[in-house]
Amino acid sequence: MHREKATNCSHTLRASTHPGCFVCGAENPRGMRIRFHAETMGSVEALWTPSPDWEGFRGIVHGGVVSTVLDEAMSKAVASMPCEALTAELRVRFRKPVRSSETLHIRGWVQQHAKRRIATEAILTGEDGTEYAHAWAVFLELPR
């Protein structure tokens, strides 16, 4: 019986954005409100200045927050194709500590789309081009 419910639920699942999204929602008073812009189909960019509210250690943005931002960049890149998909796997390499109150550049793009599997990448860089974090994710396209 539990499997039936899970199967039925997957048919109604949608991956559409909403204004209350924690990362990009304009109507979420506690959210980040990052505005992503499509550069080309399958590629997005944004600027982000993390506040001290996102710190894990004094002056350093929490790694989970950095991961969330990179996941969102890849999700937006997938959505720009356009297709509905959800993150199935996420890997992040932290290269340097991300400091709060510093303006950063976020870029996400689709590497490969084969059947339902969508491979993506994202990077977080400083204004001088220094790479702070790099992420890779696999998204699975939802059945139509």
Image (cartoon, rainbow, N blue to C red):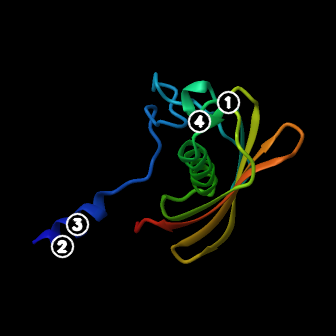
Q: Pointer 4: what residue?
A: 57
Q: Is residue 7 left or right of residue 90?
A: left
Residue lying at the far right in this picture: please name it.
128
Q: Please, what secondary structure does the residue beneath circle 2 have?
A: helix
Q: Pointer 3: what residue?
A: 6
Residue type at numbered disc 4: Phe
C-beta proximity under 8 Å, tags 3 and 2: yes
Q: Please, what secondary structure does the residue beneath circle 1 have?
A: loop
Q: Write down the quadrant of residue 144 in the picture.
A: bottom left
Q: CA distance from mark 4 to mark 3?
A: 39 Å
Q: Pointer 2: what residue?
A: 3
Mark before the other along the chain sequence, 4 or 3? 3
- Quarter of the picture holding the N terminus: bottom left
Q: Please, what secondary structure does the residue beneath circle 3 have?
A: helix
Q: Residue at x 58, y 69 (%)?
A: 118
Q: Position of residue 129 (x, y in %)?
A: 87, 45
Residue 125 higher or lower than 104, as above or below: below
Indicate which disc residue 100 carries. 1
Few, some or many C-alpha atoms within 10 Å of disc 4 (few <14, some 14-19, many ≥20)? few
